[in-house]
Amino acid sequence: MTQQPFSRPGAIDLSALKRPAPQAPAGSAAGAGAQGGSSGAGGGSAYSVTVTEQNFQEVVESSMTAPVLLVFFSASRLPESEQMARDLATVVDEYDGRFLAGLVDVDATPAIAQAVQLPSVPFVMAVLDGRPQPLLQDVLGIDELRTVLQQVGQQLTTQGITGRHQPRAAAPTAEGEEPAMDPRYAPARDALEAGDVDRAVAEYQKLVSANPADTEAAAGLAMAKVLQRTQGVDLHAARAAAAADPDDVDAQTLVADLDMLGGHVEDAFARLVELVRRTSDKERDRARDHLLGLFSAVGNDDPRVLNGRRALASALF
């Protein structure tokens, strides 16, 4: 099989998809995919999405959270490629958000194939931070795909890439029924209520270490760390230091944390996006990582986070 090592090359050219695409009929597979649901080759997978011209950019931007595997298939050109897309969606589900499978039917979306200069089908492209690279060009069985993703997962861990996607499908709650409070979070919540921020951080860290895909624990940990970093900080002194040196990462991230606590979430995001835009190398990485932590504290489904991710993607490229 043909597999490329995982790295971070240039960004995808989306210029071919700038024009508005025609709306798919209600209830069609393309329409469901445009809303971010799972359909087509992916079936009911929690970590796969049918890619259309309407949602292609959104899917690529989700690689700012964790890698996206775009699998291009065509039932008319090579029926086996469609089965491989289904199998990849199945294997991706086994990683609990470590990857998101983007299923691209090139018969239905020829403009996407043209935009990425698709060489053949099947074709799997890995995307991280909006940057693509070829991963596979052969028809593989499900066990071979498991081997490939295991190798990619090991490379990601080595590079310190640990982000997770949120599931695209969740079990509905009965109408009028309040979700039960999960007792696992009680020790952390009790610590926060008692004002013991350090203990809250430790309790949330235990939950995240036990299950990195636990997005609620990750959000709690991120917010507890904001509280921890801002304990005893003089607000006016912090803002003065940030104003005096706009490129000081420590000063700017501290004020962003204070903005978060004050409810000025968009201001915090905007400050760090501009810091990412102005900095480079390790300083840029620090600013970006801090911003991703604030995204986690707010929640990936929040519209402010979605807007912030778009702004971050623009600042990086």
Image (tube, helix red, strand yellow):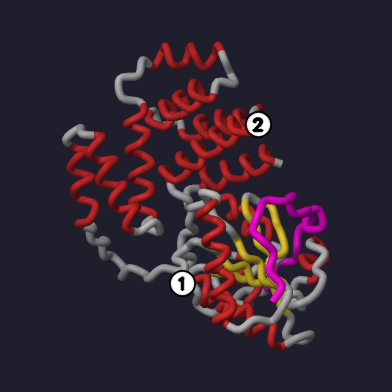
Horizontal side, residue 314 vs residue 118: left or right: left
Examine the structure image and report whether residue 153 is included in the region drawn in magenta: no
**Secondary structure beneath disc 1?**
loop
- Give amino acid for label 1: Glu
Label ID, residue 52: none
Q: Residue at x 59, y 33 (%)?
A: 282
Alpha carbon separation for disc pair 1 and 2: 36 Å
Q: Nearer the viewer, residue 13 or 4?
A: 4
At 51% from the left and 30% from the top, the residue drawn is 267
Is there a contact, CB below 8 Å, between mark 1 and mark 2? no
* Residue 20 x, y percent position in the rendering: 76, 58
Dominant secondary structure of the magenta stretch? loop
Up-down relation of residue 280 to residue 289 (above or below): above
Q: Position of residue 208 (x, y in %)?
A: 34, 52
Q: Which residues are magenta?
A: 1-24
Residue 173 showing in the rendered view: yes
Q: Which mark is residue 280?
A: 2
Percent across and percent down for residue 243 are: 54, 14
**Figure check: 224 above or below 58:** above
Q: On the image, numbered disc 1 is attached to which residue?
A: 94
Query: In the picture, residue 108 is in which quadrant?
Result: bottom right
Residue 18 located within the stretch drawn in magenta: yes
Q: Residue 205, how many percent across, how many down?
A: 31, 47
**What's under tag 2, amino acid-wise?**
Ser
The residue carrying pointer 1 sits among few (fewer than 14), some (14 to 19) or many (20 or more) residues within 10 Å by Cα, namely few
Task: Give the residue at x 51% y 68%.
Answer: 47
In the image, residue 227 sits, relative to residue 303, either above or below, namely above
On-image quarter of the N terminus: bottom right
* Secondary element at tag 2: loop
